[in-house]
């Protein structure tokens, strides 16, 4: 499906004599020390030399403030690289899931000025030809350890912090923040890790130490329930693909589970080296975002 979409975009632009560029945008989660708005700073992820998709850019929001307060940085990057003749692949980690979901749901149907893909020091690009379009040119969204459904660690105060983002990450708050079913028909490919040990008692079902499968697997509903790997007989399975999970709980529209950590080998954290379940998304972006 991805190859067919990419081929169609290629034919449309190049047979028409228009030179288009593709970009890979990486949207971080919490606790980002990189320079906000600097799209070349990959401190959050790992070495910038690592292959992670064509023309990769690090969106870099602060990872601390409310999603609503920092979402402009995500929209600035989408305007820069995903308008006009340019197209984007999106990769998001943890609370970056909330950021791209929020942007698409609330702003993906709005009028955007076409930009020139040359950002200033604040990550803002100039207009290209003075024309506009509706929404952004996005091929797909890969999500590692997605926190679109929130985390029970935020509910319980297990992070022992009171930053604005933690308030957003409470399960009820995250799930009510925007319409998660409204992705503007962009597919979200969910990568769910299960190497959870430290906080396993606080998180329902399988988890990666920070978010449980109900969130990283894109499970719909108003609250988080327990979902597991097929080897666990005492918990409903998180299913691969778009199918409803065992027990009948559906996934959000245009959400599909691309990777379920049956071997319980991947945790939540990048460790400054594209680590954890992010490594699975990085490999997919390197192979398919071109």
Image: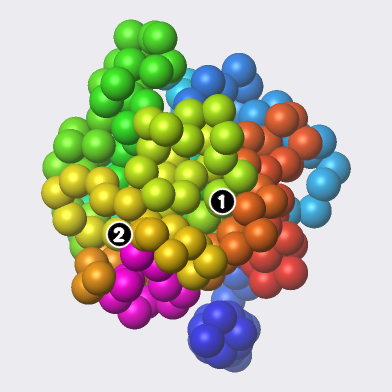
- Point 63% across, 72% down: residue: 19
How crowded pointer 2 is (Cα within 10 Å; few <14, some 14-19, many 20+) is rated as many
Determine the residue positioned at 33% across, 16% down.
Answer: 157
Q: Which residues are magenta?
A: 236-246
- Report if residue 271 is visible in the image: yes
* SS of the residue under disc 2: loop
> Which of 234/64 is in front?
234
Q: Position of residue 122 (x, y in %)?
A: 51, 24
Question: Viewed as shown, does residue 22 lie left or right of 132?
Answer: right
Q: Residue at x 55, y 28 (%)?
A: 198
Q: Main secondary structure of the magenta part?
A: loop
Image x and y of residue 242, in percent: 37, 77
- Name the residue rendered at 26%, 46% in the picture: 224
Q: Which mark is residue 193?
A: 1
Which numbered dot is residue 219?
2
Left or right of 32, for residue 184: left
- Residue 261 located within the stretch drawn in magenta: no
């Amino acid at each position: 499906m991805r190859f067919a979409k990419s081929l169609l975009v290629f034919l449309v632009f190049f047979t028409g004599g228009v030179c288009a560029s593709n970009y890979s945008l990486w949207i971080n989660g919490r606790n980002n020390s990189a320079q906000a708005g600097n799209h070349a700073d990959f401190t959050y992820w790992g070495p910038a030399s690592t292959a992670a998709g064509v023309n990769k850019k690090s969106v870099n929001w602060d990872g601390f403030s409310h999603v609503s307060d920092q979402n402009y940085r995500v929209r600035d990057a989408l305007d820069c690289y995903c308008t006009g003749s340019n197209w984007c692949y999106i990769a998001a980690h943890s609370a970056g899931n909330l950021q791209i979901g929020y942007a698409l749901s609330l702003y993906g149907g709005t009028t955007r000025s076409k930009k020139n893909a040359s950002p200033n020091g604040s990550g803002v690009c100039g207009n290209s030809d003075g024309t506009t379009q509706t929404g952004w040119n996005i091929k797909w969204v890969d999500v590692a350890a997605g926190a679109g459904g929130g985390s029970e660690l935020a509910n319980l105060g297990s992070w022992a912090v009171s930053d604005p983002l933690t308030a957003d990450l409470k399960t009820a708050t995250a799930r009510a923040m925007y319409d998660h079913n409204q992705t503007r028909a962009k597919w979200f490919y969910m990568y769910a890790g299960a190497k959870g040990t430290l906080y396993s008692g606080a998180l329902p079902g399988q988890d990666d130490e920070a978010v449980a499968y109900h969130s990283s697997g894109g499970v719909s509903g108003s609250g988080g329930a327990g979902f597991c790997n097929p080897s666990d007989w005492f918990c409903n399975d998180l299913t691969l693909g778009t199918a409803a999970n065992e027990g009948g709980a559906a996934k959000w529209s245009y959400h599909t589970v691309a990777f379920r950590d049956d071997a319980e080998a991947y945790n939540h954290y990048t460790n400054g080296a594209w680590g954890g379940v992010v490594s699975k998304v990085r490999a997919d972006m390197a192979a398919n975002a071109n």
